[in-house]
Amino acid sequence: MQEATPATERLQRDAFAPPPERGLGPAATLAILVHLALLLCLSWVVKWRDQPVILTAQAELWAKLPPQTEPERPPPPEPPAPAPPPPPPPPPPPAPAKVTPAPVKPVPKAEPVPPPKVINQKLAEADIAVQKKKAQQLADEQAKKLALEAEAATRKQKEKDEAEAVRKQKEKEEAETARKQKERDDAEAAHKQKEKDEADTARKQKEEKEAAAARAELEKKQAEAEAARKAKEKELAARKETERQRKELEDRIKKMAKESEIKEQTEDLKKRIVQKAEAESSAQEAASNVVAKISDKYAASIQAAIRPNITFTDTVVGNPAVEIHVKLASDGTIISSAIFNPSGIKSWDIAALRALDKTERLPKDETGRAPPTMVITLRPRER
């Protein structure tokens, strides 16, 4: 693993390098076949060199040569285990030149000579041993080279496998990162969509509330306008009723004037008022007595309350007075008013009644009470 660390780091640095080449099976098979052929050639060379080298010399043969013992052949080197494809092998070394023995010329039979010296045989054996040693060294070197090449190929294949594993792991991590990123993007998009939906819902609810408030405000204004209209109509109706009553009063006054019965009706009205005042309680009797005997200060306050409401532009001779009988509530509100003694000028009498209607309420006396009834005298000009 320590040897594969630089390759792994190099592949991690170069993440965008093209993928490694594939299809090593045919090349590895071819390399193994070539190496087997080379080993067979080496074995054949070693076997050929095992043949004894016969050194010939011209001599007369007188007796048989001693038998030459053939040296033991060394076992052929074991072929190395198959390995991944190595680089092309170097060309095989040239085979040694074959020494062909010279033809022996037949010689006439001569006297026997001594056997050849043993030194020639020893030299041949030494040469054979040297050749075997060289062949063995060559085979060892070739086997060592094959082993190194196989180890390099194994290491290279291991690095490729580790690089492929790193690439696959990186692709897996990138796919996992992309998946997680997609999940985060989807979750963020769903969150944004949820926030948008909530915002739309809140906006719609707000718009509905504002529309409902606007409708309620419009209905309220319409109701207020309707109430104001009804109040105005009611006020107009009240004014019309008041005007009708005044017209009826004017018509009655005109009728009374035409029939010359005004004085008689006035006297009758005075009698009824006196009888009613006498039938009331002692407190009312006291108040009735006050009607005739109101103080100048209280009379002046009554005149001050009524005078601003008088509207009379006619020119009259003198300063005629009209006496009006008035019924009051406990707080001074005018309940009713009627002419008790007319002035003789109809326009002034009507103007005095209208002034009382506009006044609506009279001030209280010095004791803080308002008399239930009183007779008020009004003139066009103050004295």
Image (spheres, rainbow, N blue to C red):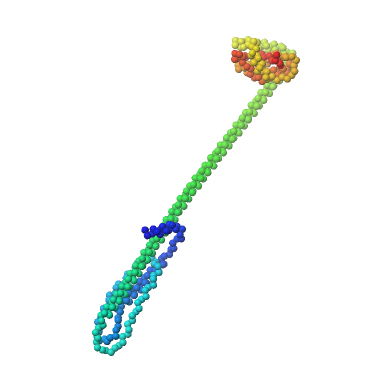
Using residue 247 as the reference point, say whether residue 281 is left or right of it. left
> Number of marks in the image?
0
Quadrant of the image occupied by residue 108: bottom left
Quadrant of the image occupied by residue 74: bottom left
The answer to whether residue 249 is visible is: no
In which quadrant of the rendered image does the C terminus lie?
Answer: top right
Residue 13 location in percent, x, y? 43, 57
Q: Nearer the viewer, residue 17 or 379?
A: 17
In which quadrant of the rendered image does the N terminus lie?
Answer: bottom left
Residue 225 location in percent, x, y? 63, 30
Residue drawn at 29 percent across, 78 percent down: 124
Q: With respect to residue 381, does 85 lie above or below?
A: below
Q: Nearer the viewer, residue 346 or 281?
A: 346
Residue 46 location in percent, x, y? 32, 74
Residue drawn at 39 percent across, 72 percent down: 91
Q: With respect to residue 132, does 256 lie above or below?
A: above
Quadrant of the image occupied by residue 2: bottom left
Residue drawn at 75 percent across, 18 percent down: 315
Q: With respect to residue 2, does 197 lie above or below?
A: above
The answer to whether residue 309 is visible is: yes
Residue drawn at 50 percent across, 47 percent down: 189
Using residue 95 as the reference point, say whether residue 356 is left or right of it. right
Q: Nearer the viewer, residue 251 or 85?
A: 85
